[in-house]
Image: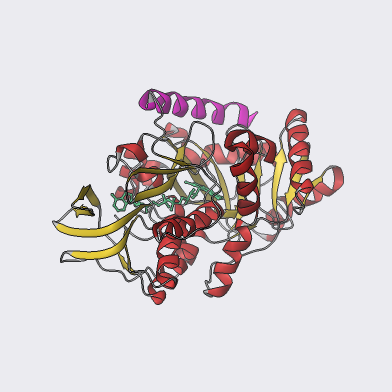
């Protein structure tokens, strides 16, 4: 759907990259929205969680399960940020491999990160199971495909590093790879048996219901516009003059933090990611594209990713903000499909949407506590379902003063210089890469 045919709300989101819940392909199958009305009077709580994505929701759930009074406020709807807009591939860890992770985090944090985040997809599966979340979990492993020989060597090295840690990953090549992908354009692939796919908006809503059942208060349409510490308490001002007071604050606003807190916002350069969904593919087309129903992302610097929804729509996605002019995102997605699966008939298109991502300087999330009683993890670098489900519970534990594994060092701040310039350069670079390298 070209931008000029998107509903007005989505068009403004494309232009300003603001949080507005676009009609992604997830809406049709996400079930009923959450009932969590905005507060109309001032309130106090032990822990205030700001942001209703995976990070904030798992924090609120953990707090409530531990009997700690928790109030979560979300500027829009639950799942309105990246959590309700992503590709739903539940992957462990990060894009980096184990050796690079150890280099970035140091040996101690690195080992904890590899152990804890390697198991984070299982944690998501456990949350889904324990709270009976109907989010179409599909446990077929995720494929990471190498687009050239150098990437195949890189993937092979990463696979060896994960396997040395006892993780269920393997390389596939040749006929086996073609049978999985239906394409002969990839050199080799890593099959990650820890990974699986979910319906991300349904998962976010399921977490919200679980948190409510456990006793957390959730309130939507509550944009926090000011956050100050006063007399040993945090005071959060919500647009429309409601005031919230809390002993601790978990800031779970990630790439949507905006001006709310400079130490968090300055940690990130923000960028986009998007999805373009086909109409449900017929049997013949499904037999051509990922015929066994797996999800796939590749090794390009700006990766391409593909997955089906339960109705057989194929999501084609990549990084960067949309705005590809008159040709439109569908034309781009059609070219990407034609390159990988030549002969695939025009599938017709159903949805176009995008979200905002936060990129840190070292490509890993950061654990930030710039002031007493204020804490958050920030910067998913495109990988946030499993990690942020883990980090939410970890933040709750820290807020409650509980011990536990700490995969990330605690930092007061980690500002990235020249953010606006970097963002503009990145945006342009991604757009060029997407329209050249990815399509040739
Ligand atoms: C198109 C796309 C595809 C992706 N694919 C994958 C994938 O396949 N696998 C994967 O692991 N990750 C993927 N990601 C990344 C993943 O979605 C994110 O890392 C993750 O959802 C971040 O969760 P979060 O809770 O930290 O932040 P978010 O979900 O962004 O939540 C932050 C929330 O804070 C709210 N907020 C902001 N400011 C305020 C305020 N002042 N007051 C109140 N509320 C506020 C926002 O409205 C928002 O709902 C993808 C992202 C995108 C955009």
Q: Is residue 139 at all visible to an observer of this figure?
A: yes
Q: Which residue is drawn at the image coordinates 61% and 44% (left, top)?
A: 305
Q: Which residue is drawn at the image coordinates 13% and 56% (left, top)?
A: 241
- Dividing the image into 4 quarters, which one contains the C terminus? top right
Query: In the picture provided, is 152 more to the left or to the right than 237?
Result: right
* Image position of 18 with respect to 249: above or below: above
Expressed as whole percent of the image width and height from the top left, the position of residue 215 reads: 37, 75
Question: Is residue 98 rendered magenta in the image?
Answer: no
Query: What is the magenta range?
Result: 419-440
Expressed as whole percent of the image width and height from the top left, the position of residue 371 reads: 32, 44
Query: In the picture provided, is 347 more to the left or to the right than 372?
Result: right
Name the foreground residue: 387 vs 111.
111
Q: Is residue 15 at all visible to an observer of this figure?
A: no
Q: Quadrant of residue 96?
A: top right
What colour scheme was applied to this rendering of the protein? secondary structure
Expressed as whole percent of the image width and height from the top left, the position of residue 282 reads: 65, 59
Query: In the picture provided, is 187 more to the left or to the right than 236?
Result: right
Question: Is residue 436 rendered magenta in the image?
Answer: yes
Name the foreground residue: 348 vs 381.
381
Name the foreground residue: 315 vs 284.
315
Q: Quadrant of residue 64?
A: bottom left
Expressed as whole percent of the image width and height from the top left, the position of residue 423 reads: 41, 28
* Image position of 218 with respect to 162: above or below: below
Q: Quadrant of residue 219?
A: bottom left
* Image position of 365 with respect to 167: above or below: above
């Amino acid at each position: 759907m070209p931008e000029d045919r998107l509903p007005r709300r989505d068009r403004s989101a494309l232009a300003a990259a603001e949080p507005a819940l676009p009609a992604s392909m997830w809406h049709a199958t996400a079930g009923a929205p959450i009932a969590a009305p905005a507060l109309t009077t001032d309130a106090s709580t032990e822990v205030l969680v700001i942001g209703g994505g995976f990070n904030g929701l798992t924090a609120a759930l953990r707090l409530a399960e531990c009997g700690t009074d928790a109030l979560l406020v979300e500027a829009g709807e639950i799942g309105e940020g990246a959590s309700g807009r992503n590709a739903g591939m539940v992957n462990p860890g990060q894009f980096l491999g184990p050796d690079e992770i150890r280099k970035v985090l140091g040996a101690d944090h690195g080992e904890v990160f590899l152990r804890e985040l390697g198991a984070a997809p299982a944690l998501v599966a456990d949350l889904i199971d324990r709270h009976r979340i109907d989010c179409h979990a599909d446990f077929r492993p995720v494929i990471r495909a190498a687009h050239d020989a150098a990437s195949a060597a890189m993937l092979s090295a990463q696979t060896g590093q994960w396997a040395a840690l006892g993780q269920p990953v393997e390389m596939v090549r040749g006929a086996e790879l073609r049978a999985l992908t239906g394409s002969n354009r990839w050199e080799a692939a890593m099959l990650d048996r820890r990974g699986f796919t979910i319906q991300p908006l349904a998962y976010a809503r399921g977490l919200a219901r679980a948190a409510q059942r456990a006793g957390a208060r959730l309130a939507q349409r509550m944009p926090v516009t000011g956050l100050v510490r006063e007399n040993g308490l945090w005071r959060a001002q919500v647009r429309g003059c409601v005031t919230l007071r809390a002993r601790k604050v978990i800031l779970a606003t990630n790439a949507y933090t905006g001006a709310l807190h400079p130490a968090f916002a300055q940690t990130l350069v923000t960028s986009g990611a998007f999805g373009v969904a086909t109409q449900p593919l017929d049997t013949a087309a499904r037999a051509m594209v990922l015929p066994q129903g797996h999800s796939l992302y590749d090794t390009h610097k700006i990766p391409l990713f593909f997955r089906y929804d339960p109705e057989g729509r194929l999501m084609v996605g990549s990084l960067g903000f949309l705005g590809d002019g008159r040709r439109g995102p569908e034309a781009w997605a059609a070219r990407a499909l034609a390159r990988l699966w030549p002969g695939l008939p025009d599938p017709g298109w159903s949805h176009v949407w995008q979200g905002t991502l936060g990129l840190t300087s070292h490509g890993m999330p950061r654990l930030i506590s710039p002031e007493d009683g204020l804490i958050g993890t920030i910067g998913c670098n495109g990988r946030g379902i499993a990690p942020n489900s883990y980090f939410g519970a970890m933040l709750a534990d820290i807020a409650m003063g509980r011990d536990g594994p700490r995969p990330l060092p605690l930092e007061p701040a980690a500002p990235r210089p020249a953010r606006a310039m970097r963002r503009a350069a990145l945006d342009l670079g991604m757009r060029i890469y997407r329209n050249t390298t990815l399509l040739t």
